[in-house]
Image: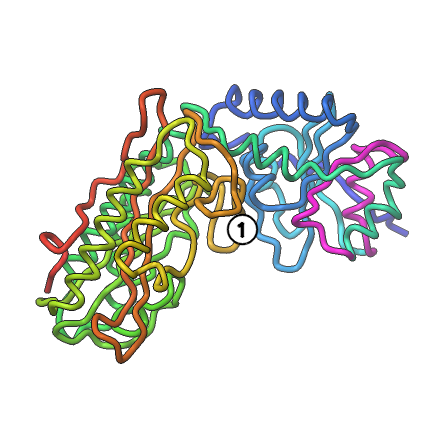
Amino acid sequence: MTTRPEMYRFHNGEKAKLQFTDGEYAERIAKLRSILVDTGVHAAVFTSMHSIAYYSGFLYCSFGRPYGLVVTDTECVTISAGIDAGQPWRRCYGDNITYTDWQRDNFWRAIKSVSGEGQVIGYEGDHLTLVQRDKLEDFLRPSISVDIAPAAMRQRMHKSPAEIALIREGARVADVGGYAIRDAVKEGAREIDIAMAGRDAMELEIAKSFPDAEYRDTWVWFQSGINTDGAHNPVTARQLARGDILSLNTFPMISAYYTALERTMFVKEVDAASLEIWNANVAAHEYGMSLLQPGASCAEITHKINSFFEERDLLKHRTFGYGHSFGVLSHYYGREAGLELREDIDTVLEPGMVISMEPMLTIADGEAGAGGYREHDILVITDAGNENITGYPYGPDFNVVG
C-alpha cells in the first residue's frame, strides 16, 4: 500500500527572477529577525497575503486553502498547497514546503516541521481566524503566542530605495491608464467600456516594462453620476451623459505593489455649483500635499485639513480619511493602517514613507453640485519635504472632457 506523505518539497524548475533582488529580501528578513529577538519570538508564522509577499515575494491564491511563511533565526520557508505545484518554490525567496490534502490539517503539520513545538510563536492577530488560531494552539502548543502584526506593519511602512523605485513606476503606469480613460470618455459610452480601456493600457505597459513579472489584479474603477458618491463603488454599464460628474480611478498592480491615480472629471461641461465644490476640493488637495512633511503627524495633518473644510462649510461632506500608505496592498489584502491620515493616527511622517493625499467630498443626490469629488496623488516623504510622483493633471482645466 502506498504511503501518502503529509508534506514534501516539490522544487520544480529553477528559481524565477523576482521583482526584487535576493539582497533586498535578505535585508527584510534580517530586520524581521531583529523584531523576533526584541519580542522573544522563536518562530514567526505569517498567514496573510501581504506579509508573505513582503518577506518572500510569493503572492498566494487561496481559494479556501491556508498558506503560510515561517521565519526563524535560520529558516525562511513558505508553506503552500499541492494545487500550486512548483510555482510557489519558483517565485519565493527561501525554501518551500508543499502540504498534501489527503488528511485535514497537513498545513499545520508542515508549519510545525519548521517552527517546532512548545516555542514562543509570533502570529498575525489581524489576520488569523479564530478557527486557525485554535489550530495553531493545538499543533504548535506554543509556550507563548505574540502578535507581531503591528511590528511587521511598522517595518513595511518604511520603504527601501528598491520599493520606492517600483512604486514610482507604478505611479507612471497609473498615469498611462488615466490618459487612456480620458481619451475614451464620450457621451453614450458605458462605464465598463471606459474602465476596460484604462485597464488594458496599464496591463500592456506593465508587461512592456516588467517582462519577468506575473500579471494579475490590475483594475479600474470608473464611476459616473450618482455612482461617484463612494470611493470604492464598482463599475456598471451606466451610459455617460453631458454634464455628468466622473471619477477616474486606475490601479496598476506590479508584483503585489499597489499604486493609484484618482481624478474628478466632467463630461463636456461643468455647472457653476459643481465647479465651486470641485475647486474647493482641489484647493484642499493642494493644501494637504503641502502638509506632508517629515515630522508632521497624521492626526495633525488631518485636523488642519478639517479646519480648511470647516471654514468653507464643507466638512460635513467629508466621507473618510485624507490618505494612506502604499506598498504591498490591494483592494482585498493588505493595509498599513498605522500610516493613514485620520484623527486617531499619531504616526509621525519620516523620510522613506510613501503616502497619498486624497480629500473627498460627497454631495447628496438632489443637492446642487451632487456627486463625489476626489483627487489623489502619491507622495514620497523626503528629508527636505516630499516628492509628488503622480503626473496626470488634476482640476477643471484638464478634466472637463469628451
Q: Position of residue 307 (x, y in %)?
A: 34, 49
Check the image and name the residue furthest to the front.
311
Visible residue check, residue 93: yes
Q: How many marks?
A: 1
Does residue 125 belong to the magenta stretch? Answer: yes
Q: Is residue 171 above or below residue 349?
A: below
Is residue 19 or residue 390 the one in the foreground? 390
* Residue at 27% over, 48% down: 284
* Residue at 80% over, 49% down: 106
Check the image and name the residue furthest to the bottom.
366
Is residue 292 or residue 235 the one in the foreground? 292
* Residue receiving disc 1: 333
Visible residue check, residue 200: no
Q: Is residue 368 above or below residue 402?
A: below
In the image, the segment drawn in magenta is 103-130
Q: Secondary structure at mark 1?
A: loop
Q: Is residue 155 above or below residue 303?
A: above
Residue 119: quarter of image? top right
Is residue 168 or residue 295 the one in the foreground? 295
- Which quadrant holds the C terminus? bottom left
What sort of colour scheme is used for the picture? rainbow
Q: Position of residue 9 (x, y in %)?
A: 71, 36
Q: Is residue 120 above or below residue 126?
A: above
Does residue 120 belong to the magenta stretch? Answer: yes
Q: Amino acid at mark 1?
A: Tyr
Q: Position of residue 10 (x, y in %)?
A: 67, 38
Question: Few, some or many C-alpha atoms within 10 Å of disc 1 (few <14, some 14-19, many ≥20)?
Answer: few
Residue 221: quarter of image? bottom left
Q: Position of residue 3 (x, y in %)?
A: 87, 48
